[in-house]
Amino acid sequence: MREANDAVLTAAGASGQKGAASTLVAAAVAKGEAVVANLGDSRAYLVHKGAIRRLTTDHTGPFPSSVTRFVGDPRGAQPDVFVESLEPGDRLVLCSDGLTRHLADQDIAVRAKGSDLKKDVDALVDLANERGGQDNITVVLYAVPSRFELGDLRHALISVILAILVLVVIAGAVAALIIASGAVVMTR
């Protein structure tokens, strides 16, 4: 998270767009546990036996779109970090607020329990888009394997998920910088 924070600050400084920021949620999974961290209003959920529980707390202020902790903070990254126990069959959902603005927690739980993770993610994104899709919609879905002996495969998957999350944050910050610089004109 520190590296993502530094990358956003560097990109913002290089483009002259001070104040560029993004939210971030990440998880590292090993040996039946997930270490989860978040900044802003990107969220992590645990779906266990069909029931969903939000793991993170939004870092938001009293005004709409007011985020109090974020990537790109010159004070440094100040994430909430905690450990969650996982059981075989559990689903870990990491998502941006583009998803949670349009879907209730139960909508997420219902669509995050299929056998095809890609189809589940596509269903979540499609439904959020159908309901308005006003913001970027990012979803990462992790299924806890039935057996924990697949350590090497699990480690590789975790590395890929973390790399994707960092790339999404950096890409979002760069896109925001480009839009803020006036190089791209947004119309609605």
Image (tube, grey):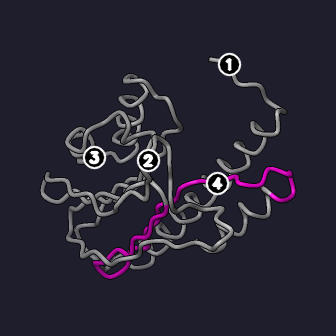
Q: Residues within 10 Å of mark 3 (few under 14, many from 20)?
A: many
What amino acid is labelled 1 in the image? Thr
Spatial CA span between label 2 and label 4? 19 Å
Residue 187's label in the rendered image is 1
Q: Secondary structure at mark 3?
A: loop
User: Is 145 placed above or below 164 here?
Assistant: below
Residue located beneath label 3 in the image: 112
Q: Is residue 115 left or right of residue 58?
A: left
The Cα atoms of the two marked residues, 2 and 1, are separated by 25 Å
Instruction: Give residue 165's position: percent from left, percent from top.
Output: 55, 58
Label 1 CA crowd tier, 10 Å (few <14, some 14–19, many 20+):
few
Q: Secondary structure at mark 4?
A: loop
Q: Write down the residue under mark 2.
A: 139
Q: CA distance from mark 4 to mark 1?
A: 21 Å
Mark in the foreground, 3 or 1: 1
Between the C-alphas of marks 3 and 1, the distance is: 33 Å
Q: Residues within 10 Å of mark 4 (few under 14, many from 20)?
A: many
Residue 158 higher or lower than 139, as above or below: below
Find residue 21 and name its label: 4
Q: Is residue 120 magenta?
A: no
Q: Which residues are magenta?
A: 13-39
> Sequence order check: which comes first, mark 2 or mark 3?
3
For mark 1, give the secondary structure. Answer: loop
Q: Give the CA separation, mark 4 to mark 3.
A: 29 Å
